[in-house]
Amino acid sequence: MHPPYLTAAQKAFYHEHGFVVVEQLLSPAEVAAYLQIYDDFLSGKIETGNSRADLGAYLGERKATENITQIMWPSAFVPELLSMVYHQRALAVSKELIGEDAAMDFDMLINKAPHTNTLTPWHQDEAYWPDLPDKKASSCWLALDQATLENGCMWFVPGSHKKAIRPHRYAARPGGALLCDATEEEATAITLEPGSCTFHDGRTLHYSRGNTTPHQRRAFIINFRPAAMIALERAQGFDHGKNNAGDRQLKNSHFRN
Ligand SMILES: O=C(O)CCC(=O)C(=O)O
């Protein structure tokens, strides 16, 4: 693929609905290269310490693996990722969506291991972040496996990015996953082939079902926002857990415990 990556119709769809699908951002060969790195993260060959956590810890501890494996900042552990095709292309798409000043705020891996059957609670990403004057933000969710209803593809609530943010609360314990009230009836499920992805707005309401299949559901996520807003976050000491893995979220005006 070469820039520009998006048609005018795709850009219009993103702004109207709060998300858009981009097919085959990565080729099958590129996906294979990312899966090797991804599996080194999952196996622990690449050590990630307390940057690795269980996003599904609200269900209690699981022995063999996390309910939902979340690894923050893979590019801090493998800096080569930053110059590889996914980061480059996702940044280019984000610039087309939210403006030339878009820059990477953070990246993360979220895997649902076989038969873990743990849903990602309904939420809006903005609920995890400090209140910023410019709320433009775009998150790329790249499927490295086929994403299906059975293994936990993403569901988005169209138009939710244009409405007030819903009140969020902790799914279980303080510091863990946030959740708000929403239903599948409001939402659209997006199944994806490996190498395809979605971009969603920071306020777009989303969720995914659990993985009931015997296969992994590996997703690689990169979030982008205007460089000046990243600087403002960092000035407040907020870096999505890069230097302080415990500090992944701040209380903001959307949070109700
Ligand atoms: O992968 C998932 O299940 C959830 C991902 C998510 O919430 C996000 O990318 O914002």
Image (spheres, rainbow, N blue to C red):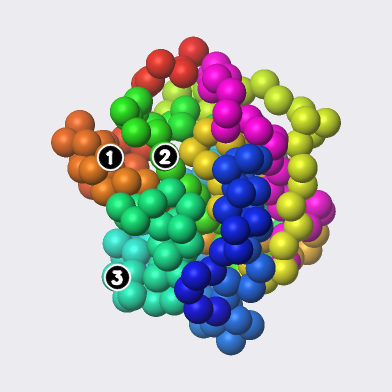
Mark with earlier residue (2, 3):
3
Q: Badge 1, how many Cα within 10 Å: few under 14, some, many 20+?
A: many
Residue visible at 46% across and 17% down in the picture: 255
Q: Position of residue 197 (x, y in %)?
A: 61, 61
Towards the viewer: 104 or 22: 22
Q: Position of residue 79 (x, y in %)?
A: 29, 70
Label 2 close to label 3 by CB (< 8 Å): no
Label 2 close to label 1 by CB (< 8 Å): yes
Kindly identify the amino acid type of the residue bearing the numbered disc 3.
Pro
Residue 60 vertical position relative to residue 224 in the rendered view, above or below = above
Mark with earlier residue (2, 1):
2
Residue visible at 30% across and 52% down in the picture: 101
Mark 2 and ligand 1: say if the CB distance to the nearest ligand atom is below 8 Å.
Answer: no
Residue 144 image-quadrant placement: bottom right
Towards the viewer: 46 or 89: 89
Kindly identify the amino acid type of the residue bearing the numbered disc 1.
Met
Q: Which residue is mark 1?
A: 229
Q: Which residue is mark 3?
A: 79
Kindly identify the amino acid type of the residue bearing the numbered disc 2.
Lys
Distance from Cα at disc 2 to Cα at disc 1: 9 Å
Q: Which residue is mark 2?
A: 136
SS under mark 1: helix
Residue 127 is at least partly visible in this image? yes
Image-based side of 138 in relation to 230, left or right: right
Numbered disc in front, either 1 or 3: 1
Mark 3 and ligand 1: say if the CB distance to the nearest ligand atom is below 8 Å.
Answer: no
Distance from Cα at disc 1 to Cα at disc 3: 22 Å
Mark with earlier residue (1, 3):
3
Q: Which residues are magenta?
A: 146-169
